[in-house]
């Protein structure tokens, strides 16, 4: 056999025993190398790959309080994404910018800034609402549980007594509503932490020509007033937040329990949560609205060249210029925003609690 014939025979033999080429999306030699690397590290598509958090991190995420914070954050973010245009119109009307009615304000924003103007300040609003709602709902749930537990312990162990002369006083906590205390604590905690974001959101909404974006707003506010400028109107905000937050949570929890008791139900369905949440927001907003007007005036007063020194002065200014009805200017727009916002927020919050707590075996 000739040498050429032997070479052909060897070539044919080697071709018959070689494996077929690997066909993949990476192509050529690099594709073969890529596939071999994946095979070596055992990450081919037919291999199950699972990512597991460290035990400490997993234990932290499984805590009840963390899941309640997460539920509040997700509920707030989803609600604000839907209702941002109503928030823009409400803020403009409360502080007296532009038209004095809802339709006129809506048309004015669209004409001046386009449809995107209805979402002016929405980025900072989304950044604001996630920590705000997380802190608010998380603080509410934790405080309510703590107060209820404390009341139960005092009942079992007999409450302390204070004796003054021949008069004995029972220091009982039974007259205190855990829900009302928790609502007040939730409002105060979220305000103290997130107030600078509220200031930024209002500035971006009211004066987009001066504060075109978040970075410019932060620089300009700091340049004009330093760190203290980010806490402008904090005192009236706290004063206004206390009655609103207390009433808001108390109304929802009370109506929810009464309704379930009357209907002999263990829990509400989603439409019922929506309606009760909306009613709670309407009631709380109506009671505290004059304080909200004064608060907004103080927060953005510097933009108009005049800023009342305190809440009483702001209320007096409104009454002097517009009469008593001025204290409820923008109330219709506020209810238009607050009612669906409150209802949707509670509906989303309860839904996320079902997912993150109930399905994980954590009782409510």
Image (cartoon, helix red, strand yellow):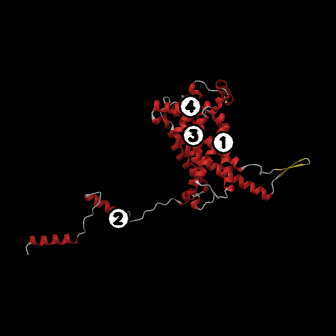
Tell me which residue sits at (53%, 42%) in the image: 83
Q: In front: 228, or 323?
A: 323
When asked about the image quadrant of residue 55, the answer is bottom right
Are the residues flagged by discs 3 and 1 in contact, CB closer than 8 Å? no
From the viewer's perspective, is the residue at label 3 or at label 4 nearer? 4
Tell me which residue sits at (59%, 41%) in the image: 338
Dot 2 or dot 4: first in sequence order is: 2
Dot 2 or dot 3: first in sequence order is: 2
Badge 4: how crowded within 10 Å, few (<14), some, or many (20+)?
some
Badge 1: how crowded within 10 Å, few (<14), some, or many (20+)?
some
User: In the rendered image of this protein, does residue 299 appear above or below residue 178?
Assistant: above
User: In the rendered image of this protein, does residue 47 appear above or below residue 314?
Assistant: below
Q: Identify residue for label 4.
A: 101
From the viewer's perspective, is the residue at label 4 or at label 1 nearer? 4
Mark 4 → mark 1, Cα distance in angstroms: 22 Å
Q: Identify residue for label 3.
A: 337
Mark 3 → mark 1, Cα distance in angstroms: 13 Å
């Amino acid at each position: 056999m000739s040498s050429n014939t032997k070479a052909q025979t060897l070539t044919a033999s080697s071709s018959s025993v070689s494996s077929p080429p690997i066909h993949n999306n990476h192509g050529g030699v690099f594709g073969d190398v890529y596939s071999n690397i994946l095979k070596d590290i055992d990450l081919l598509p037919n291999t199950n790959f699972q990512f597991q958090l460290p035990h400490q991190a997993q234990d932290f995420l499984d805590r009840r309080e963390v899941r309640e914070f997460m539920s509040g954050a997700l509920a707030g973010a989803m609600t604000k994404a839907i209702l941002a245009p109503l928030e823009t119109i409400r803020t403009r009307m409360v502080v007296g910018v532009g038209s004095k009615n809802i339709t006129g304000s809506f048309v004015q924003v669209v004409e001046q800034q386009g449809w995107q103007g209805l979402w002016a300040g929405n980025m900072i609003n989304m950044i604001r609402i996630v920590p705000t709602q997380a802190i608010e709902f998380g603080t509410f749930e934790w405080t309510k549980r703590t107060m209820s537990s404390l009341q139960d312990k005092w009942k079992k162990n007999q409450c302390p007594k204070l004796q003054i002369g021949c008069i004995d006083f029972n220091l009982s906590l039974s007259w205190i509503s855990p829900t009302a205390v928790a609502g007040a604590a939730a409002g105060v905690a979220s305000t103290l932490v997130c107030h600078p974001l509220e200031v930024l959101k209002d500035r971006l909404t009211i004066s987009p020509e001066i504060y075109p974006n978040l970075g410019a707003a932060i620089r300009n506010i700091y340049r004009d007033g330093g760190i203290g400028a980010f806490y402008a109107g904090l005192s009236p905000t706290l004063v206004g937040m206390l009655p609103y937050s207390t009433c808001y949570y108390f109304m929802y929890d009370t109506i929810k329990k009464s309704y379930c008791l009357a209907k002999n139900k263990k829990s509400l369905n989603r439409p019922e949560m929506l309606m009760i949440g909306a009613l709670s927001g309407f009631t709380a907003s109506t009671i505290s609205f004059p304080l909200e007007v004064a608060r907004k005036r103080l927060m953005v007063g510097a933009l108009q060249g005049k800023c009342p020194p305190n809440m009483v002065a702001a209320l007096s200014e409104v009454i002097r210029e517009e009469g008593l009805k001025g204290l409820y200017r923008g109330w219709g727009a506020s209810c238009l925003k607050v009612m669906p916002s409150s209802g949707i927020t509670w509906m989303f919050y309860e839904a996320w609690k079902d997912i993150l707590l109930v399905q994980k075996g954590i009782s409510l």
